[in-house]
Amino acid sequence: MKKEDLWNAVGEADDIYLKESEELMGVTYNPPGVGKTLIYAASIVAVFGAMLILPKVLFGGSWGTPADTSKVNGSDTTEVSDSDTDVTADTDADTSAPDDYKKEYISYHEGVQLSFPIDVDDDRYLLFQTDPSYESVLYQIFYLASDGNWDGEILRIYRYSEGEYERNVLANFITPTYPLGTDGEYYYVMTVPTDVSIDPNDEAGIKTASVWREHVKTYFALENGLTPLDKGEFHSREYTYDGEHKFIRYYPYGTDTDYFYTLVLSQPAEQGNDGIWCVERWYDMQKAISTPHAGDTSEPVTKITGNIHIEFPDSGMLSAKEYYAELHAKVWKGQTAVPMKYLDPLTVSIAFAREVLGNEFADASYFVEVDGVPEGEYTY
């Protein structure tokens, strides 16, 4: 889709957002191709190969002339509002930056602010403000190729609850995620898609993506007074929960005991005989057997490797701690159909194999308790 077509689709979708964003940001809208272009918000349905549904849209690739209210110099910010919510800029936020990373424009959205690096070609990206009730996304930034085609996302910024952060960041090893910080209620995270292909000869495009990502990682937490987050600290822990742990070896193929998973169980709510159990993580297993070459009399060598999988409950907005505290209370109030499903480590393991790992035939014969985690090279 061409950039001009996207603008037209946006304008036709809901003209009222153009007026609101002019009042919000203090800028004047110019049609595409006439000087600088407006930053604005709208709900759009855009087509890129197929229909893509995008929520409220804000900000285009280039800019109108900003009023004083949209520029910051040190802590010079002002109160702004739109039709959905009143947002007061944090005048105490640390917006200082070195001269070579000066910030000119700021977006105010859902109580947070996002500044823009000026050391990029502003015709090479589109920035959308989105409704966080839609998959918890606050911002999306899209890359525009040199031919004007909209090629994909540079990054997203998410606003998660603690439970969403646990499942989507701490237990996610597929999508590159960069925790930005927390305000105690929400957890802000930047993700970088793995399917955006920028022409290696497009130096401006490569620079746009790189500068934006580094800018967000460097300044978003400072500008919003967030406490930094470090998922590496969590992954360096031996266990998710303190207290006693049990280790259950699970043979997914039943009688084939050469291949197994190891489940690590803990008591996430209360310790002791009355505490419920959960599978907090598990180890899969891969074997590589080296066969000696002809004439080599050495014995074959088996190398054990595998992956560590972190498990958090599907708890909605609740953190795992809150979820398990509620579950523990329900078990002892008789509000669960099968209390032993949570109180006995073996029964918990069988339920996990059936419900999470998909083995509907799993029973006690598939499991044996062992002393600890498996030997071998296991990574997240």
Image (cartoon, grey):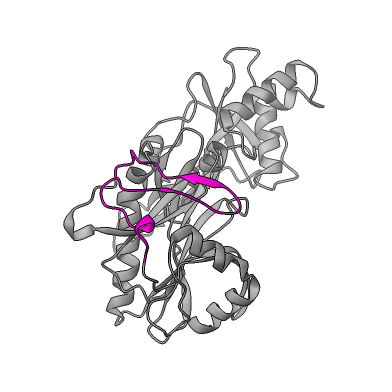
Q: Which of 175 and 248 is in front in this view?
A: 175
Residue occupying the point 63% across, 45% down: 252
x, y (%) of residue 67? 37, 62
x, y (%) of residue 197? 41, 75
Above/below status of 215 relative to 355? below
Judged left or right of residue 239, residue 295 is left
Q: Residue furthest top?
A: 273
Q: Is residue 294 visible to us here?
A: no
Judged left or right of residue 203, residue 287 is right
Tell me if residue 126 is in the magenta stretch.
no
The image quarter containing residue 226 is top left
x, y (%) of residue 327? 69, 25
x, y (%) of residue 97? 23, 51
Residue occupying the point 70% across, 46% down: 359
Above/below status of 371 relative to 234? above
Q: Which of 145 and 191 is in front in this view?
A: 145
Mainly helix, strand or loop, the magenta region?
loop
Q: Which of 123 and 326 is in front in this view?
A: 123
Above/below status of 281 relative to 107? above
Residue occupying the point 56% across, 66% down: 19
Q: What stretch is highlighted in magenta?
A: 66-94
Q: Nearer the viewer, residue 203 or 261?
A: 203
Q: Is residue 78 visible to us here?
A: yes
